[in-house]
Image: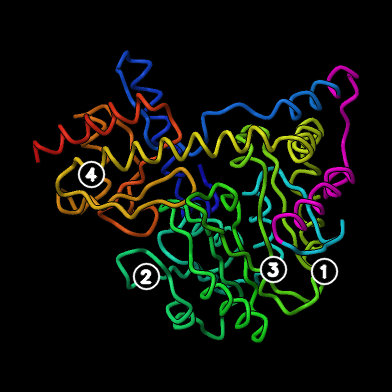
Amino acid sequence: MNLGKFSYEIKPSPTLALNSKAAELKRAGKNVIHLGGGEPKWYAPETAIKKAMEMLETRVVRYTPVSGIPELKDAIVDYTFKYYGKKVEGKNIIVSSGAKQALMVALLAILNPGEEVIFPAPFWVSYPDMVKLANGTPVPVLPNSSDLQITFDEIKNKVTEKTKAILVNTPNNPSGVVYEAAEIEKLVKFCEENEIFLIMDDIYRELIYDGLKSPNGFEFSKADINSSYVISINGVSKQYAMTGFRIGWAVGAEEVISAMTRIQGHQTSCPSAVSQVAALGALQGGEKEAEELRRSLVKKRDILTKEIAKIEKARLIFPHATFYSFVDFSAYEKDSHKLAQFLIENAEVVTIPGKDFGIDGHLRISFCGSEEELIEGISRINEALQKI
């Protein structure tokens, strides 16, 4: 078929491809353990389900305003003040079909063809292709330090006259690293002085442990919200274990949000009405379940790090947040695609290659599954690696 040239340039999501491979092996009767997952195995808040059920029982589920229902936007206003210390209004918020769509329409709203978006590695696997879909040029930045911390100077060195935005994900997927507040502060100041957008992917910011706090762009902004170049992306998927509801949002200057709303209106019209009221329920009463999830993840994180330590030549950057670890296996195999395939075939364990996150030789290993799967899966990995 004569498809558009651009459709061939966009790569499929490697995480989704490996999910499909794992499902295929399970259907074939293999005892596959999936340690690459990107969603917490937890229950959605009871208040979220109750709100959704109440709407469904009316049998009246209709279109909503493109940028989200007013009640949910009001709850996000409260959330933004509670967690960010920033006073905003409904006009500064767009609700989207997941944080991924919020990020995508933000890129579409701000980029002209050929303009550059800088982001630190390791990065979420979708960033490069999302920038390309918005006709931009992705510019990854490799950290110089082995702890995967990125510095302001490393990012600044990549800035050119074509730079339109800097995209930062902290806490970080895939590493669980929390970037230093001082570096984020410098970035905010630099971006606002140079009229460069700073997109903060904050989807994991409340899944943070060990008494740490994740820096947010708004706390360092000297500008009024409607003059600020900071755009915050967040949602209910991770903090409230509601990945399937597909509700995320962006907070930013009214001009940016208005442009995003116009674009979203032609993409999806509006987010799901049922999912929006469920998200409202989570924001209004889901803190108990969110805290239980955090405690569960800390326990699993500690199990994972203990088990990884048994693998002689593996090196782990301790994850203080998210539900991911980014383990350096380069002493066994520098090509992470080969290594991930080797582990599927020889250990029946699914992991995600680090190359797709911008740093080869590593694997992303998630700790959001069961404790039993963590222990068994890493034990299998250790046993398989002895054959290399």
Element class at badge 3: helix
Residue drawn at x 56%, y 28% as measured from the top left = 42
Q: Earlier in the sequence, mark 4 or mark 2?
A: 2
Measure the C-alpha gap from mark 4 to mark 2.
24 Å
Residue under pointer 3: 218
Between discs 4 and 3, the one toward the N terminus: 3
What element does badge 4 sit on? loop
Residue closer to the observer: 39 or 5: 39
- Residue 309 is marked as 4
Instruction: Locate residue 167: give its quadrant.
Output: bottom right
Select label 4 or label 1 by which is in front: 4
The amino acid beneath tag 1 is Glu
Dots 4 and 2: beta carbons under 8 Å? Answer: no
Q: In the depicted view, which residue is nearer to us: 278 or 11?
A: 278
Residue at 21% across / 37% down in the picture? 342
**Residue at mark 1:** 255
Quadrant in the picture for the C terminus: top left
